[in-house]
Image: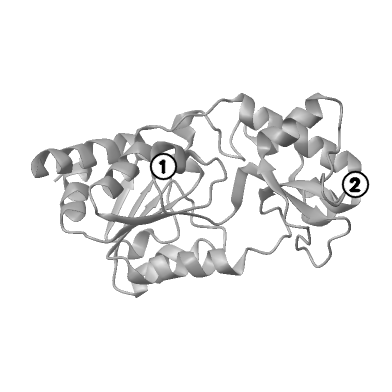
Amino acid sequence: MSDVRSLTGILRDSRNIVAFTGAGVSTESGIPDFRSPGGIWTRYDPREFTFDRFVESAEVREKSWQMRREFFDLLPEPNPGHRALAALEGAGRMMGVITQNIDGLHQQAGSSNVVEIHGTARDVQCIGTAPGHDEPDGCGFTESHQWALDRVDAGESDPRCPHCGGLIKSATISFGQALAPDVMDAAADLAARCDTMLSIGSSLQVYPAAGIPLRAKEAGAVLVIINDEETPLDDVADLVIRGKAGETLEPAVATLRSAES
């Protein structure tokens, strides 16, 4: 039986699907994996972009806005993998998407319940004038990323909060910054309640996020792994597919929707 037929059968028997997605689900949208050739960390030193370094150094903050500019200059759009997951939600089978990605492409494709473990690059937030303990301590000001980039383009290399003068940072989780407890709780809740967990495009090596698919499996869910390379959870998965997200998900979901129409 082909991988697509096997996946279609699992989707057909599922009513509460949750997807856990990593960088591999967005590479088909033209966003390189951070560590792949052409990825962000081939041009920037990740050791510079810790939360503490961002707070301490105006130079690091300036570089971070350059990095965000490069990211959005890619003009990424949702690919068939993103759209297939949104279609599963439209069919009433998808409970939600838990993503390690910061690109916002799941929402753009039409998924409504998206838990962004590492935050989003599409928003910026005030983190206060001198936040400590690796946590933002701002006044609550948030805006779209374009607000900050417009100010950078106007000559502000280090935009400040218009309300309190605090530092402005992309609403993403930086190295050394704690994951938001409420976000992790929401992800854990979805993992505990799903009947099928689709792990898509993730190496499943970055913890604690990578433990979420295992939590679902231990709670009794069927675990499907779709990834170009081996992962540490391949041995416990019910189905492992070597391939790209869109090339696998799109035909499986299309077949399922066709059979139901």
In the image, which disc is placed on residue 228? 1
Residue at x 31% of width, y 40% of height = 84
Give x and y (percent) for residue 153: 79, 24
In the image, is 37 to the left or to the right of 132?
Answer: left
- Whether residue 86 is visible to the viewer of this picture, yes or no, is yes
Can residue 244 be seen in this snapshot?
no
Find residue 57 and name its label.
2
Q: Residue at x 75, y 47 (%)?
A: 169
Give coordinates of residue 69: x percent, y percent.
Answer: 70, 29
Q: Position of residue 34 (x, y in %)?
A: 61, 40
Quadrant housing residue 148:
top right
Which quadrant of the view contains residue 79? Answer: top left
Extreme bottom residue here?
A: 219
* Left-right relation of 175 to 80: right
- Amino acid type, mark 1: Asp
Q: Residues within 10 Å of mark 1 (few under 14, many from 20)?
A: some
In the rendered view of the protein, which quadrant contains the C terminus? top left
**Color style of the picture:** one colour
| Mark 2 element type | loop
The one of 246 and 103 positioned closer to us in this rendering: 103
**Image depth: mark 2 or mark 1 in front:** 2
Give the quarter of the image for residue 253: top left
On the image, the x and y values in percent for residue 31 come to: 54, 32
Residue 156 position (above or below residue 55): above
- Between residue 112 and residue 68, name the one nearer to us: 112
